[in-house]
Amino acid sequence: MKIPFSALLLAGGRSSRMGEDKAMIPYGHQPLWRHQVEKLKSVGAAEILISRSRDQLTWDCEHLFVFDRFEQVGPLGGMIAGMEASTYDLMMVLAVDLPLISLDVLEGLIESITPGCGAIYISDLYFEPLVAIYPRILLQEMISALESGERSLQPLLKVWVEAGKMRSLKIPPDLLVQWSNVNTPVQLSQLRGSQ
């Protein structure tokens, strides 16, 4: 029996290098946010939340929008808001600007979780925090980190993996391309060309 989990789509970035809201950019036959939400549905998320900044547009959909309590602190702020609003003890996180992430990659995370223990991919020495599953037991540690001025997830993830709160999964070299993100119009054009 699969462990139920919430899913959070991180869609609240500034998109300054793109010049327009990345979440709303057409990708395939739909906006990028929906492209990612469809994946989260396909892997069985029990609920889906969408993280946005308070000054950003939202849109009509069946999913709950959550807004950063900690403004302009990067993904950690969105993750805290998602975890505070989520129903389940495990929360899958997926960034809106990683459109090549496959269902197999997300399923790999799901297969690796156990109650109270999340999962994250690692490439070389770097964790990939925007495609991961986090346990709720980390919420207070996330809040404390931000309150102490720590915004980077890398040192936190190292501690959590060593403590057995997260399981790390090595990314096979042939799958690394899936972590190509869309930050600029040039990158978007290149990824559309690979569809």
Image (spheres, rainbow, N blue to C red):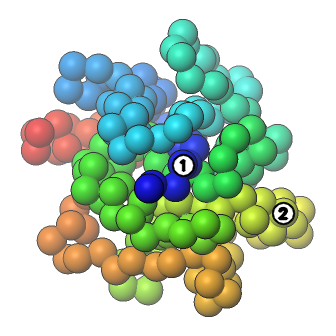
Residue 134 at x, y percent in the picture: 60, 61
Q: Residue at x 73, y 27 (%)?
A: 54
Q: Secondary structure at mark 1?
A: loop
Q: Residue at x 22, y 62 (%)?
A: 177
Q: Residue lying farthest front?
A: 1
Which quarter of the figure has residue 22?
top left
Classify 25 as above or below 195.
above
Classify 118 as above or below 164.
above
Labelled pair 2, 1 in contact (Cβ < 8 Å): no
Under mark 2, the amino acid is: Gln
Q: Which residue is mark 1?
A: 4
Q: Secondary structure at mark 2?
A: helix
Residue 53 at x, y percent in the picture: 68, 32
Instruction: From the viewer's side, name the closer residue of 42 and 51.
Output: 42
Q: Which residue is mark 2?
A: 140
Residue 98 tag number: none
Residue 1 at x, y percent in the picture: 44, 56
Q: Residue at x 57, y 75 (%)?
A: 166
In three-dimensional space, the C-alpha distance between marks 2 and 1, rounded to whole angstroms, equals: 21 Å
Give whichever of discs 2 and 1 has the lower sequence position. 1
Q: Is residue 121 visible?
A: yes
Which quarter of the figure has residue 149?
bottom right
Q: Residue at x 25, y 56 (%)?
A: 104
Which image quarter holds the C terminus? top left
Instruction: From the viewer's side, name the closer residue of 13 and 42.
Output: 42
Classify 189 as above or below 64.
below
Residue 72 at x, y percent in the picture: 72, 46
Which quarter of the figure has residue 183?
top left
* Discs 2/1, front: 1
Q: Residue lying farthest bottom?
A: 162
Q: Is residue 48 left or right of residue 174?
A: right
Under mark 1, the amino acid is: Pro
